[in-house]
Structures are given as C-alpha cells and as structure tokens.
C-alpha cells in the first residue's frame, strides 16, 4: 500500500507512513473471551469442565495433553513474551497493525472499550517473572512511534507468558497409543489452534476405529 491507501484503511495513520503491507484475510480475537465462549460451548454440548486437577482420571480412554510449557520434555524450550494493555480514546484502529521498528517490532491489536494490546517481546528463556523495565520502555516507545496518541494512553495492564516451542518453531500433534500430545505452538497460539484441534480429533477417531482405545 502507499500512503493514501494506508489512510483509507486506517484514518488514524493518515500521513504517518509512506508504505505498508495489507493482509486482507487476517483476523484477530480476544483470547480471554474466546476461551470463555469455548468453555460455554463445550458445556452446552454435554462436556464437563473441571479446574484445579493435577492429573486426569485413571479411567479415561484417551488423554489429550495440552499442558504447554508444563510439558518438561527436553526438546521443548520456553520463549518468553511480554505485552502491555493500553487505553486511549484518541485513536481508533480497525485491525491489528504491525510496525517494523528499528529496535523492536511491535503489533497493536484493538480491543473493546478503547483498549489496545501491545506486544510482544520474544526472549529465549522460560522465566515467568514480571515484565522488565527495559521491555516496558521498548514496547511503549514502539507504540509511540506508531502513533503519538499512545504517549498519553493509560497503562492498565502488563502481562508475561512463556510460549512452548520446538527447535523448528513448528507445532506438533503426536499420538502414543491412547495418549495424544499437542504442543510447540510457539507464537502462533490461537491462529493455529483450529487446525491443531482438527488433527487431534482425527487421531482420536482413528484410535477408536482401529480399536486402540477400549
């Protein structure tokens, strides 16, 4: 896109950038709301959702392990990601916007109620402590470079997570008898979740059809 095309899609960025890339089919969601919706959908289909269990019942036919960084296999590594949640009514975005910043590449995702998620760092470690001052300053600086209105935004939340990743950064769905493991989603997360779920479901049905499970 040229400057005029950028302005047509995102008026708040009018005059700020001379060129960009537009991915028409890209979408975004709020993971927290998505998880609540998925839980309610499962319950509506008759599934039982339990929290606080350290292990699955011994009587299960198939166990699907989605423990992420809780899986301590040596081939998995942790990649730390940090994010900010900002609130401002001075700018409006219709879609996620990524900025290739000289110091840190940043993406800004619009949410409801004038909220914007700013992420995310990518640090090769599995530390789960609070966000660092350096990362906070870099993310804020990159957001400000995208639009100065973020300089006056409220910093309402910070977040840290550890993404599980294999050496090739690609996810895997693996089966061992009645056990299925889904892991290594790296930075892809919710973007690849539907495809991973379909592969897991196919393996479960295949196990039943071959009599692997009782």
Image: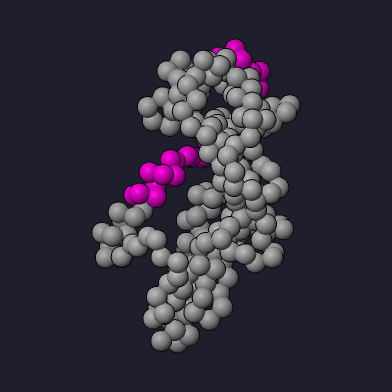
Work out which quarter of the rendered image holds the C terminus and state it. Answer: bottom left
The answer to whether residue 2 is above or below residue 58 is above
193 relative position to 144: left or right: left
| 59 or 171: nearer the viewer | 59
Q: Give the image's coloring scheme.
A: one colour
In which quadrant of the rendered image does the N terminus lie?
top right
Residue name at image x 60 percent, y 24 percent: 140
Residue placed farthest to the top in the image? 15
Q: Residue 19 lies in magenta, yes or no?
A: yes
**Looking at this view, is 67 or 14 the one in front?**
67
Residue 119, picture quadrant: top right
- x and y percent of residue 11 in the render? 50, 17
Report whether residue 21 is seen. Answer: no
Residue depicted at 61% across the width and 15% down the height: 16
Q: Where does the magenta region start and end?
A: 11-37
Q: Residue at x 26, y 59 (%)?
A: 44
Any part of residue 25 in sight: yes
The secondary structure making up most of the magenta span is: loop
71 in relation to 209, above or below = above
Farthest residue, direction front = 129
Question: How many numbered marks are there?
Answer: 0
Q: Where is residue 106 in the image (x, y as percent from the top left)?
A: 62, 31
Above-or-below relation of 214 to 43: below
In magenta stretch: residue 66: no
The x, y position of residue 167, in whole percent, is 72, 58
Q: Is residue 140 left or right of residue 153?
A: right
Q: Nearer the viewer, residue 85 or 169?
A: 85
The location of residue 88, given as percent across then percent down, is: 45, 20
Between 131 and 205, the one nearer to me in the picture? 131
169 lies left or right of 10? right
């Amino acid at each position: 896109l040229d400057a005029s095309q950028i302005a047509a899609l995102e008026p708040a960025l009018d005059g700020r950038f001379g060129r960009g890339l537009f991915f028409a089919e890209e979408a975004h969601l709020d993971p927290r709301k998505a998880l609540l919706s998925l839980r309610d959908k499962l319950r509506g289909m008759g599934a039982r959702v339990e929290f606080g269990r350290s292990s699955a019942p011994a009587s299960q036919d198939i166990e699907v392990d989605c423990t992420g960084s809780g899986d301590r296999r040596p081939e998995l590594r942790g990649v730390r990601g940090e994010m900010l949640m900002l609130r401002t009514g001075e700018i409006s975005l219709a879609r996620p916007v990524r900025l290739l910043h000289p110091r840190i590449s940043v993406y800004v995702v619009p949410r409801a109620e004038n909220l914007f998620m700013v992420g995310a760092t990518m640090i090769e470690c599995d530390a789960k402590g609070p966000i660092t001052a350096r990362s906070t300053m870099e993310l804020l600086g990159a957001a400000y470079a995208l639009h100065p209105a973020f300089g006056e935004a409220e910093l309402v939340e910070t977040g840290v997570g550890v993404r599980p990743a294999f050496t090739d950064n690609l996810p895997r769905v693996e089966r061992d008898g009645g056990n299925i493991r889904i892991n290594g989603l790296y930075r892809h997360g919710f973007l690849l979740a539907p495809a991973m779920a379909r592969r897991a479901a196919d393996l479960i049905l295949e196990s039943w059809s071959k009599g692997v499970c009782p």
